[in-house]
Amino acid sequence: MIQWYPGHMAKAKKEIISNLKLVDVVYEIVDARIPRSSRNPDFDEITKRKKKIMLLNKEDLADERITDLWIKHFKEKGIEAVKVNAITGKGFKELEEKTKEVCKDILEAKVKKGLTPRLRGMILGIPNVGKSTFINTLIGRKKAKTGDKPGVTKSLHWIRTPYLDLLDTPGVLWPKFEDKTTGFMLAITGAIKDEILEMEEVALFLVSILKNRYPDYLINRYKLDKIWEEEIKIIEDIGKKRGCLVSGGEVDFVKASTVLLEDFRKGNLGRISLEEP
Ligand code: GDP
């Protein structure tokens, strides 16, 4: 687990800004389940003069209806967004089309100058949103794991695709914990280590969303008889159904919380979005 200090952050930011000068378009990857919490708010400032496409990744885990609302939301703000699955490459074709559309003027200018109409792009995102997976799938083989090391200047390599040269080193910034909700959202999706927040607290937060928005998913997965108003009682029921007990027959809340969080992360409950626009 790396620590981010203001110095790190400043250096990483500077590096991203200097790499951005080399590209025509930037792809900002977010987790489609939490498009608000899975980005560093500084990305807006950093990319404000660049053409940008949002990639709503892990679309297979998110609620499609809500992902479409996010796409609409970004479009209203003048930003194109595409839903993708970085593992399977679903959405990559649409991404290619959107990229060409967004960069139409650049492509035309290149043709006018007698240059090959290729584009240069770069990936941006916080840890765990799927940057390395995206790059690997795009090139159809495994590149080195990008890692989350800030401010490590590497030599620049470009990944060639038929229409785009992509910088193989993504811009990484740690998320900003501006409020407790952001921390919980990141913890639920596994973007920050489980030690940082209490598992039970994280699970309670998840249940507080699920009981209102996806109660049937809880009922179906754990064969619950009802959904209690109190989150703790829902977790207790999950523990009972799953045999998460300590000696004496009491429910082991940490274990029950872990079962729920693992099921959520694997998509076993169903396709769930935690944030709406
Ligand atoms: P990075 O830190 O941004 O480079 O993220 P990684 O590429 O290492 O991905 C983080 C985790 O998310 C890995 O376990 C990936 O397998 C998983 N992942 C990435 N993209 C997807 C996706 O589209 N769908 C699903 N279900 N998992 C994904």
Image: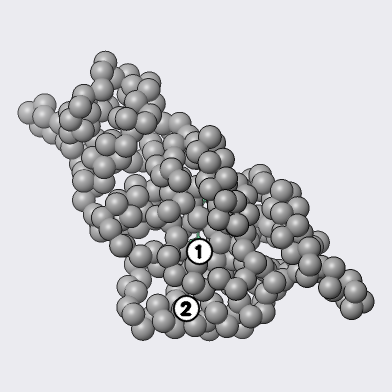
Image side of residue 100 versus residue 80, left or right:
right
Horizontal and vertical percent for residue 124? Answer: 54, 66
Residue 151 shown left or right of residue 158 in the figure:
left
In the picture of the structure, the residue carrying the numbered disc 2 is 13
Type of the residue with mark 2: Lys
Label 2 Cα neighbours within 10 Å, binned few <14 / some 14-19 / many ≥20: many
The mark that comes first in sequence, 2 or 1, is: 2
Going by the numbered disc 1, the residue's amino acid type is Gly
Q: How far from the left and from the top, in percent, is residue 132?
A: 56, 61
Q: Which disc, if any, is residue 125?
A: 1
Looking at the picture, how far across and down is residue 90, in whole percent? 66, 44
Foreground: 193 or 20? 20
**Mark 1 residue CB less than 8 A from any atom of ligand 1:** yes
Give above or below for 194 relative to 48. above
**Residue 242 drawn above or below residue 32:** above
Is residue 120 among what the camera can see?
yes
Could you say which is closer to the camera, residue 129 or residue 36? 36
**Neighbourhood count class around disc 1 (C-alpha, 10 Å): few under 14, some 14–19, many 20 upward:** many
